[in-house]
Image: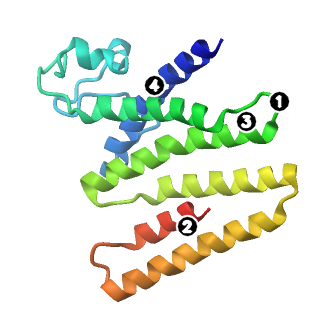
Amino acid sequence: MLPFWIGSLFLFGLVVGSFTNVLIYRIPRGIDWKWTRSFCPKCSKPLGWFDLIPLLRFALYKARCRYCKKPISWQYPVVEMLVAVSWVGAFFWLQPSLSSIGSLMTFGWVLFLIPVLVALAFIDLEHFLLPDGLIGVGVVTTIFYRITLHLFDGGWLTLWIDGAAALGLVLFFWLLILLTRGKGMGVGDVKLAFLVGL
């Protein structure tokens, strides 16, 4: 049974990794990621369902677009594998139990947060930008997770400590920005620090 769950996590992680690539490409360019069909970034040709199979399309087409034959970035399979392997790693690290609601909540939260953080990392690498929308989704989800989890375990003191840690990191990064006059670190890092603190 364990191999089935691991295999399923890995395959679904590849699919989510493929969607993460969509966010990485479209969000900083202001392209709609909800309703616009996937397309080749080189020739703008709309892609069919077969062109969207994670890893397989990259290998079968020898890292080239099926239509214009131009190279496909290695970022695509790397992100897909990174999300999939991280999901499997999270399973072994957290060892979620079906008999524990808190355990399942934590596992679900981590699975959600992984592609958000991967997208933020790759967007930052290419554009030196940390989109508010992605950070906001991470923050709201994390706050909801922490509050809901504490409703089950009654650990309200821990929740206050979480908030203090988040605000402490924000103040620390604001101080760094002031001292360095914004060189090497921007306001986006402060917002990300809030998420890290949570």
The Cα–Cα distance between marks 4 and 3, rounded to whole angstroms, is 21 Å
Q: Quadrant of the N terminus?
A: top right
Determine contact: label 2, label 3, CB under 8 Å. Answer: no
Disc number placed over residue 163 in the picture, else none: none
**Residue at disc 3, secondary structure:** helix
Residue bearing mark 2:
194
Question: Is the residue marked by circle 4 packed among few (<14), some (14-19), or many (20+) residues within 10 Å?
Answer: some
Q: Position of residue 152 (x, y in %)?
A: 86, 49
Name which of mark 2 and mark 4 comes first in the sequence. Answer: 4
Q: Quadrant of residue 179?
A: bottom left
In this rendering, position of residue 89 left or right of residue 188 = right
Q: Which-is-in-front pick, marks 2 and 3?
A: 3
Name which of mark 3 and mark 1 comes first in the sequence. Answer: 1
The Cα–Cα distance between marks 1 and 4, rounded to whole angstroms, is 27 Å
Q: Which-is-in-front pick, marks 2 and 1?
A: 1
Q: Nearer the viewer, residue 188 or 193?
A: 193
Determine contact: label 3, label 1, CB under 8 Å. Answer: no
Amino acid type, label 1: Ser
Q: Which-is-in-front pick, marks 1 and 4?
A: 1
Determine contact: label 1, label 4, CB under 8 Å. Answer: no
The Cα–Cα distance between marks 2 and 1, rounded to whole angstroms, is 32 Å
Residue bearing mark 3:
104
Amino acid type, label 4: Val
Residue bearing mark 4:
15
In this rendering, position of residue 54 left or right of residue 90 = left
Q: Residue at x 54, y 73 (%)?
A: 169
109 to 36, vertically: above or below: below
